[in-house]
Amino acid sequence: MKVLKKFSQYLLKILPIINYTIFKNELCINISTNKLIPILFFFKNHTNSQFKVLSEIC
């Protein structure tokens, strides 16, 4: 959990994230819709993330 919180704070510094929550070891972020594509690109390609699965967009 500490690693996820630290990563979340790192994301706040470098991405246009409005806010975030951590619940049951899952990170949820709120962003502006016009920033969706660059943020998804970041999560897919950045060395610290490289996420492969997107579970939900609301």
Image: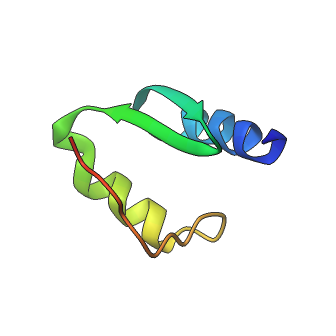
User: Depth check: 18 or 3 in front?
Assistant: 3
Q: Residue at x 67, y 33 (%)?
A: 9
Q: Is residue 30 above or below residue 56?
A: above
Q: Residue at x 63, y 71 (%)?
A: 47
Q: Is residue 34 left or right of residue 1?
A: left
Compared to residue 10, the image places residue 21 above or below, namely above
| Image quarter (top left, top right, bottom left or bottom right) of the N terminus | top right
| Residue 2: % across, % down | 83, 40
19 to 31, vertically: above or below: above
Residue name at image x 46 percent, y 62 percent: 43
Residue 3 drawn at (x, y percent) = 80, 47
The quarter holding residue 38 reads bottom left
In the image, is 7 to the left or to the right of 27? right
Q: Is 10 left, or right, of 57 in this rendering?
A: right
- Whole-percent x, y for residue 17 in the image: 42, 32
Pick out the residue farthest to the front: 24
Q: Residue at x 36, y 65 (%)?
A: 41
**Residue farthest along the top direction in this orientation:** 19
- Mark count: 0
Quarter of the image for residue 6 reads: top right
Relative placement, left or right, of 17 versus 58 is right
Residue 51 spot, x, y in % from top left:
50, 69
Residue at the outermost left position:
34
Residue 58 figure quarter: top left
Structure colour scheme: rainbow
